[in-house]
Image (tube, rainbow, N blue to C red):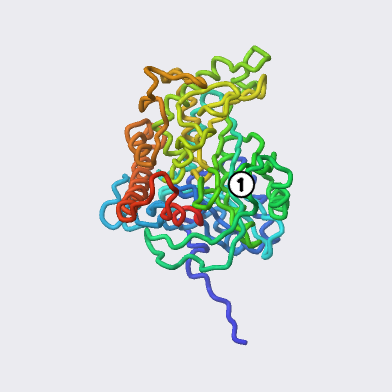
Amino acid sequence: MYSRSWPRLYAKGSVGRPAFATAFGLWNDEQVAAAEQVEAGLGDLDLVRLVFCDPHGLARAKTLPAETFRSVLRNGMDFSPGPFLFDTGHAVAVDFLSDPGVGVEELAGAGNFVLVPDPLTFQVLPGTEPRTAWVMGDEFLRDGTPHPLSSRHALRQVCARYAKRELVPVVGLEVEWYLTRRLPGPVGNEGNGFGLQGPAPVVEAMNPGYQFNGFAAYDSVSEVANPLAMALLGLGLPLRSMEHESGPGQLETTFDPMFALDAADAMVMFRTLTKQYCARRGHHASFMSLPRIDGFDPSGWHLHQSVMDASTGRNLFAGDDPSGSISPRGKAYVDGLLAHARDFCLLSVPTVNGYRRLGPGFSLSPTRIGSSVEDRSVMVRVVGSDSATHVENRVGEPSANPYLAIGGQLFAGLEGLLGEDRAPRPVAPGDTPGAGTPTPTDTLPQSLREALEAFRGGAAKELLCRPLTSCLTKLKESEVSRFEAWCEREGPAEGEVTEWEHREYFGAF
């Protein structure tokens, strides 16, 4: 057999610049030490998945031979900006051929950016053959500055604002999702294209559902859920519980509290690898809020939040009353969440489908802007006592970009802590403001269009910078406009989950 050794004519891994991370001082001491450990273990691996999170919260990746990754680790790797340009249905939403209009010159002509692995996120995936690892990357322009469209960088910036005040935000994940059994059928390519999603995966429910926390209901999914739980633990994720929710095959997965960036990284890994794990076993996992399947109940993502004093480790939300009251600083944080509830709603509920859950038909899904203690009908719920006191925002959908959703919450909470906001009056259960009819400022947006308009007029540019705000606006305008055009043509029944939504989200998310 003829064989030869091919010369390396270019820098390994198609890098933007050799020693990119070192040349621009992109790593701290902890990352430098972690990189040395990663490099020492590459001989025991075959492949590395280099991952970043796009604006929609979906993982985008390249798979590299371990020896190629050896140079990419410090050099970075060229990536296409396509994931910044496409909406959820892969329609081109940012006109990169003429004027991108987002304030990032490098997008013109769809030029590459450099993705630099974060060695602190390097994780060997257990039980894989070939032997495979996962690592998150940070997006940079070629001059070594963070890419303005990087959602991971946006969250880092918010965390830095806390660090300047010797504060540390702490986040807990509570995620609902659907496990279904995949049925034989086409892969979904019929009619597919840019902005034209083909048929969604054909599935059947795992059980009848509507036996909340039922032992037998969980047992019906345990053949997949139990080994999945062990795999998540093997990844080092701080899994706290797996339980069966109300819907048929609807699961809730919770994790112990984490630092904010760790929590966002964990959410990306959890969703991505859960979908992969289930698919390889003939099942389909979906984090779409409300699939178009008979009897399904909407799924939410409840974000638990508290703030720690970095010097003492004390929870700022802990009140003096052992019965469970929240401290004045905790109340100020909640005020910030309420004040920004409308203009940041797009970050927690970024899809057309997510607003189905916020409709009047689902009593445990929040629609009013308010807070209360241990009450699941309100937007922000105060939970726990003493050092465990925290707040739970119940607005989010499980497919949201975790860096943007968490970043928006932390930014709003810090604004409240700093006393820079004047929140609307919290609405207690049964309370009716004014003459009894909710005003727009009392309620959360009820559609993606309404949320987009609130986002345009809110404090997004203070949180995200102008380029990312502009890019998100273009992406969401494209998505909602395609949906509205479809509705005009097809005339779906009022209030139903449409075929467009099921095609758009059920497979991808």
* Quadrant of the drawing holding the N terminus: bottom right
- Say which of 58 and 285 sits in front: 285
Q: Which residue is farthest bottom?
A: 1
Disc tally is 1
Q: Position of residue 254 (x, y in %)?
A: 64, 39
Q: Secondary structure at mark 1?
A: strand
Q: Position of residue 31 (x, y in %)?
A: 60, 44
- Circle 1 is placed at which residue position? 250
Mark 1: amino acid = Gln
- Say which of 245 and 6 sits in front: 245
Judge left or right: residue 26 versus residue 80.
right
User: Badge 1, how many Cα within 10 Å: few under 14, some, many 20+?
Assistant: many
Judge left or right: residue 361 versus residue 384.
left
Judge left or right: residue 448 versus residue 265.
left
Q: Which quarter of the figure has residue 120?
A: top right
Q: Position of residue 161 (x, y in %)?
A: 49, 28
Q: Position of residue 149 (x, y in %)?
A: 41, 45
Q: Is residue 147 visible?
A: no
Q: Is residue 161 above or below residue 188?
A: above
Judge left or right: residue 377 versus residue 223.
left
Q: Is residue 260 above or below residue 69?
A: above
Q: Is residue 199 above or below residue 318?
A: below
Q: Is residue 171 visible?
A: yes
- Say which of 267 and 112 sits in front: 267
**Residue at the (65%, 24%) spot, across then down:** 384
Q: Which residue is farthest left?
A: 98
**Residue at the (69%, 51%) spot, across then down:** 225
